[in-house]
Image (spheres, helix red, strand yellow):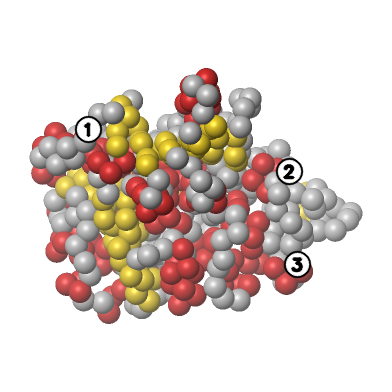
Amino acid sequence: MKVLVACEFSGIVRDAFAKGGHDVLSCDLLPTEQPGNHYQGDVRDILDEGWDLMIAHPPCTYLCNSGVRWLYSQKGRWLKMEDAKEFTAVSFFAGAGGLDMGFEKQGFKVIWANDIDEDACATHRLWSTAEVVQGDITKIDVSTIPNADILLGGWPCQGFSLAGPRQLNDSRNVLYKYYVKYLEEKKPLCFVGENVKGMLTLGDGEIFQAIISDMYEKGYTLFYKLLNVKDYSVPQYRERVIIVGFRNDLGVTHFDFPEKHDKIVTLGEALAGLPEPSPEDICHAPYSSRYMSRNRKRGWDEVSYTIPAMAKQVPLHPSSPDMKKLEKDLWKFGEGITRRFSWQEAAAIQTFPKGMQFVGDLDSKYRQIGNAVPVRLAEVVAEQVYKKLCECIKEDNNELGVGVI
């Protein structure tokens, strides 16, 4: 029997099947030091290779369409994939879909998504089956948006960002209210929001407390935590606030945010196998005084600086010579060829699947990539949310009705 193993402890599971005489391959986005047949990459790249059995953890229910028999693990029990609960999701401010893609990998089905950016919506449509509606969310009647189990969305963060103007009256800071309006009218089981760390301190914390209060009033118990994506197999230093809310009637009193991974994924590992980019795939804009005010280069054995939405602020590729500090807020380039990451390299650092296409010109591609939630971070958060929802539904309503293998 030909078996594909794409789950936690994949090496152990793989070896168990191999001892039984099966032709087995393990798969993960991360490299492994364990001996044996292992594919490092996205499991979707190797689905069409004649597998008789696939094993996944957590439930990758979007893969059920492959027609191959699946098993998945829930709390250490192996269950039939057809018994897995697939939760539906609606996504606001979806962009190219980093958050959505991570949740789809963990048993959620995005059925409707919105963003004001035309190119981002076109990119989202390339990989997802959701109804993607392009336009200003403030002009969309909430009653026309479908009901779903979960609401996703990182509302626009420019007004909150530590890197930009931090104005209390920034019009972009009120867009979260449209997010809250959906909660009030549609009452999904839970929601997941993401934003920059500046949101916590804007206006001496008053803005964040106002957001929390608004959501509490709509009947949701909230949990939030500042996470650094480098701790979750994303090769980048990027701090973001994750907010998770559960409807009060679910009785959730505790939520476990994902534990830090033991291993840090480096730029060398993330960019391995990528071809040398074409000149047209790299931003060649002049380097501004802002750019030259600090170091922009990290080495192959380190993680990247934050991938921004603005092309000309994208960090330097590790092959560039080291920058040298001249004085406070002034650096210079070393001798040799200096270049920024290409958009494809930036996408890999944001943990989008290798080969993923983005619609639009070069600035648009960089913007979509930099604005996205790293897929890998979304995936580990989604895993925890899925587990908690399954616990709530099984305990309260016994809706899952799963059968133990």
Comes first in the chain, label 2 or label 3: 3
1 and 3 marks in contact (CB < 8 Å): no
Looking at the image, residue 308 lies above or below residue 15? below
User: Dot 1 corresponds to which residue?
Assistant: 403
Say what amino acid the circle numbered 2 marks: Gly
Comes first in the chain, label 2 or label 1: 2
Judging depth in this view, the residue of 272 and 325 nearest the camera is 272
Comes first in the chain, label 1 or label 3: 3
Mark 3 neighbour class, 10 Å CA radius: few under 14, some 14 to 19, many 20 or more = few
Q: Position of residue 249 (x, y in %)?
A: 10, 44
User: Dot 3 corresponds to which residue?
Assistant: 278
Whether residue 222 is visible, yes or no, is no
User: Dot 2 corresponds to which residue?
Assistant: 299
- Distance from the alpha carbon under mark 1 to that under mark 3: 52 Å
- Distance from the alpha carbon under mark 2 to that under mark 3: 21 Å
Q: Is residue 258 left or right of residue 394?
A: right
Say what amino acid the circle numbered 1 marks: Gly
